[in-house]
Amino acid sequence: MFDDRLWAPWRSAYLSILSEDDKDRDDKVCVFCAVEEKPDEAVYVVRRSHNTFIILNIYPYNNGHLMVIPYQHTSALGELSPEIRLEMINEAELAIRALKTAMNPDGFNVGMNLGQAAGAGIDKHLHFHIVPRWSGDTNFMPVLGQTKVLSEGLDQTLAKLAAAYQTLEG
């Protein structure tokens, strides 16, 4: 009855973040660390700060799903300096304001999954998730079809957020 495939061509950007040389290395470069050296638009970086960057999650739970990521590669929150931890919180707060401006959600889920057992897909490089939520944003597709449907492409969301950040930064 249902086709098992839903097409999301923007996800191919994720696969191209690492160069072929990186993919063959024994020590496997972290995908978040590899983002640091790529053009922002190619890997959906929304904003860069001194110690952190914000990126659209290319496997989003909802439209506008952002991640605040420290440049420092660590899986332990305690290994970050107080300065970096504070910047992560401040950037998360600014991201929430930008999402409110750009997308007008009804609420947010904000948090970290520390460790694979806690649900971290990339458990070696900690990061905050900021997921905008709308009343009634769960429908039959994830419940019955085990598939999430997004109403907007990542390029559109990136453009909306860029405009929102410009508005907020005056």
Image (cartoon, rainbow, N blue to C red):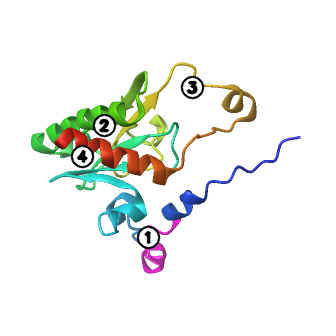
Does the image show residue 80? yes
User: Badge 2: few (under 14), some or many (20 or more) residues near its Cα, within 10 Å?
Assistant: many
Q: Is residue 16 above or below residue 168?
A: below
- Identity of the amino acid at label 1? Leu
The kind of secondary structure element at disc 3 is loop
Q: Which residue is mark 1?
A: 18
Query: On the image, which quarter does residue 148 sit in?
Result: top right
Q: Nearer the viewer, mark 3 or mark 4?
A: 4
Q: Nearer the viewer, mark 3 or mark 1?
A: 3
Picture coordinates of residue 12, whole percent (x, y): 55, 63
Left or right: residue 99 compared with residue 141: left
Picture coordinates of residue 22, whole percent (x, y): 42, 75
Q: Which residue is mark 2?
A: 98
Q: Earlier in the sequence, mark 1 or mark 2?
A: 1
Numbered label attached to residue 166 = 4
At x 54% / y 44%, what residue is drawn? 152
Query: Which stretch appears magenta?
Result: 15-26
Q: CA distance from mark 1 to mark 2?
A: 28 Å
Q: Nearer the viewer, mark 1 or mark 2?
A: 2
Query: On the image, which quarter does residue 149 sit in?
Result: top right
Please identify the quadrant where the N terminus is shown: top right
